[in-house]
Image: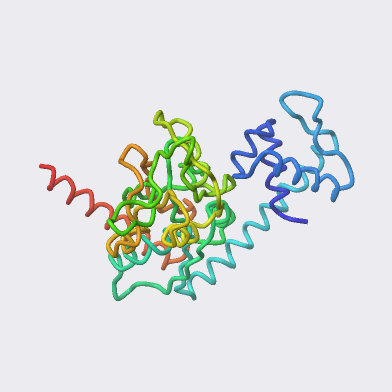
Amino acid sequence: MDTRWLEDFLNLSESGNFSRSARERNVTQPAFSRRIRMLEHWAGGQLIDRSTYPTKLTNAGEQFRDGVTPILQELYRLRDEVRSEMGNKSATVIIAAMHSLSLGVLPKWLHAVASHESPNIRIRSDNHHDCLQALAEGNCDFFLSYAHPNHPVLLEPSRYPYLDLGTTSLAPYSSPDAEGNPVHELPGSAEAPVRYLAFGLDCYLGQVVSEALIKNKQPQFLNSCYVDTVADALQAMAVEGLGVAWLPEISTTNDVAENRLVSAGGEAWAVPLEIRLYRASTRRSVSAERLWDTAQAYVKGMRDQSHKSSA
């Protein structure tokens, strides 16, 4: 039994809609449906009447809901007590961060907000989905993520506020030839398509790049020859001259400065991204709250400086 199944079930009992509940629970609809089925299998009977719309509970489902609700509330209460006790004793703050952000942004940001009272920090570097789930399930204090208008992060703003830490872009890069020109240059041609080092479509940046290429009005001739979900892996392949890769600009600074990578296309090929620091609205440890306060002051300072510069 997984308590997430109970949370899924209670959410569905309120919404009456599998798609809406899946979005609110930050999972795909097929995965959400499987979890409801697994709960029904564990309970030993049908809890959901799928023949109606909106979806309703069966009689057994109503009895199950009424019994499960206070049990789950008590589990939450006990969990919060334990976490509060441990939070008061421990200064460790857990930050979940997408792979490229844990290298390109997180160290500089932590250095900027560091003080003599800075807590011990543990970094959980992972893919977008697993980082998001860690925050939603209370297994980390903060989530450092990219965000794109057409691919919103599936977190309810009222429950998961965020700070805007700046912007970057996903842009195409290639290794240079002896004259400093890209070995693999966009847009390519039908006769000689560009070797393309692609993000998998099952990862966040892969979905962002894929949609941007579909909407880009420029002709493009790409031959996908390598697929990965980790930006660092694609960047290493691009440095070795194996193709063109769309990479976060913040990750390529050193390779560009040392002439290991060059732009493989103009600005029209770049995809803008926001960098956000998310947290849950529920109170965390004293150390986590202090770091959030420091982060807010840091962001305010950046905005004030920007306003002065533009004045």
User: For the view shown, which residue lies furthest in the front direction?
Assistant: 191
Above or below, comparing residue 231 to residue 88 in the picture: above
Q: Nearer the viewer, residue 300 or 179?
A: 179
User: For the view shown, which residue lies furthest in the top direction?
Assistant: 53
Q: Do we see residue 283 in this rendering?
A: no
With 64 as the anchor, is 144 left or right in this view? left
Above or below, comparing residue 119 to residue 209 in the picture: below
With 89 as the anchor, is 79 left or right in this view? right
Where residue 178 appears, as percent x and y from the top left, is: 31, 59
Quadrant the N terminus occupies: bottom right
Q: Nearer the viewer, residue 290 or 114?
A: 114
User: For the view shown, which residue lies furthest in the right direction?
Assistant: 44
Q: Nearer the viewer, residue 23 or 223?
A: 223
Q: Do we see residue 190 in this rendering?
A: yes
With 60 as the anchor, is 311 left or right in this view? left
Above or below, comparing residue 26 to residue 295 in the picture: above
Where residue 59 appears, as percent x and y from the top left, is: 85, 34
Where residue 83 appears, as percent x and y from the top left, is: 56, 66
Residue ID at (46%, 65%)? 285
| Colour convention of the picture | rainbow
Where residue 149 appears, as percent x and y from the top left, is: 42, 37
With 259 as the anchor, is 73 left or right in this view? right
Q: Nearer the viewer, residue 100 or 247?
A: 247
Residue ID at (40%, 28%)? 217
How many numbered marks, from 0 up? 0
Quadrant the C terminus occupies: top left
Residue ID at (71%, 40%)? 30
Residue ID at (52%, 42%)? 207
